[in-house]
Amino acid sequence: MKEVVKVPFQIIRADITKVQVEAIVNAANETLLGGGGVDGVIHRAAGPGLLEECRGLKGCRTGEAKITGGYNLPARYVIHTVGPVYKGGGAREEALLRSSYLESLKLARDHGVKSIAFPLISSGVFGYPKDQAIQTALSVFSEFLMENEMAIFLVVYDKAAYTLSEKLFDSVKAYIDESLVEEEKGDYRRVVFESSQASRTGGETSEDSYGAGDLDRVVSALEATFAQRLFELIDSKGKEDVEVYKKANVDRKLFSKIKCNPDYKPGKATALALAIALELGIEETGDLLGRAGYALSRSSKFDRIIEYFIREGKYDIFLINNALFDFDQPQLGV
């Protein structure tokens, strides 16, 4: 079985009992003795040893978490947590759901776990509204990863059970479906190209700046590479490296490669993730992408989704990846 590539955060469609991680999270009930949904699936896959160990735990309260071995599962550990039953939102459901995620992550960290897979807790028979459950999960993951190193996977077995809020989904879809940019904005690709060129040349955008055969002059006038420009932007915006790569959902080792090699060219998803982390506008994003050999295209659903969030000033990488997943597109930082 192919191992899942470990990045800081990723949404995947899979059977959680088969994901190759160190720990999986079981959305359990307070008895910890198995049940329906994910709980029952995990117990069946792990075998009778899991139930026997759970008997000794004497249950678990809502919002808390306990850990056992993985037995017949690929994962070394199973972390059992009890999410809240949704009662309309006035019974501390959000606080309890946040606690379920956070206590599971803390328990994993305390046991040296480097990779963990979660289901969407409380969103099944416990009745928690799925769009709100997703928002809570992403918020906790984002906050935890700013202070900790761990690969977190949100595992979706049935994509229909994991969607954006209807309002955001409709807004993104409408933006994707636009066939042309409004006339007053001009041609998108020309505007981005000319503005980025003008910023580099002091306003001149002519392609005849160099005479024919003047190769030495052309080569000597090469602009900053992607990596060089990236770190110029980080400095100019007063940000720390760790803040940028964490907000970009980019692995620390990959970020180090970019920093140590001025000529390193990352994949497009990584380049865009770093632009999002720096909260760049469309023109700055186009300029940074161009230095790695990429551009935003109006014929690409992936690019249109990214453009929507940039134009809306929404730079939450987890929310963007949520939208990309919902539209069957690759995720940023992955």
Image (spheres, rainbow, N blue to C red):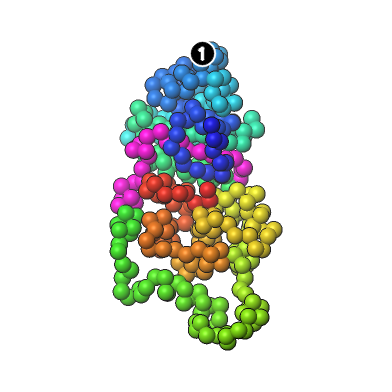
Q: Residue 128 location in percent, x, y?
A: 36, 34
Is there any visible trace of residue 164 in the rendered image?
yes
Q: Secondary structure at mark 1?
A: helix
Q: Residue 222 location in percent, x, y?
A: 62, 75
Q: Residue at x 43, y 21 (%)?
A: 40
From the viewer's side, name the closer residue of 235 and 326.
326
* Magenta span includes 168: yes
**Pointer 1 local density, CA inside 10 Å: few below 14, some 14–19, many at least 20:** few
Tag 1 residue: 48
Q: Amino acid at mark 1?
A: Pro
Q: Residue at x 36, y 75 (%)?
A: 186
How many marks the image carries: the answer is 1
From the viewer's side, name the closer residue of 122 and 268.
268
Q: Residue 139 location in percent, x, y?
A: 48, 44
From the viewer's side, name the closer residue of 125 and 333.
333
In magenta, the rendered stretch is 147-171
Residue 48 vertical position relative to residue 144 in the rendered view, above or below: above
From the viewer's side, name the closer residue of 306 and 58.
306
Answer left or right for 222 relative to 82: right
Q: Residue furthest right?
A: 260
Q: Residue at x 50, y 29 (%)?
A: 18
Q: Residue furthest bottom?
A: 211
Q: Residue at x 49, y 67 (%)?
A: 286
Is there any visible trace of residue 277 in the rendered image?
no
Q: Residue furthest front?
A: 213
Residue 296 vertical position relative to residue 333 in the rendered view, above or below: below
Q: Residue 51 location in percent, x, y?
A: 51, 15
* Magenta span includes 151: yes
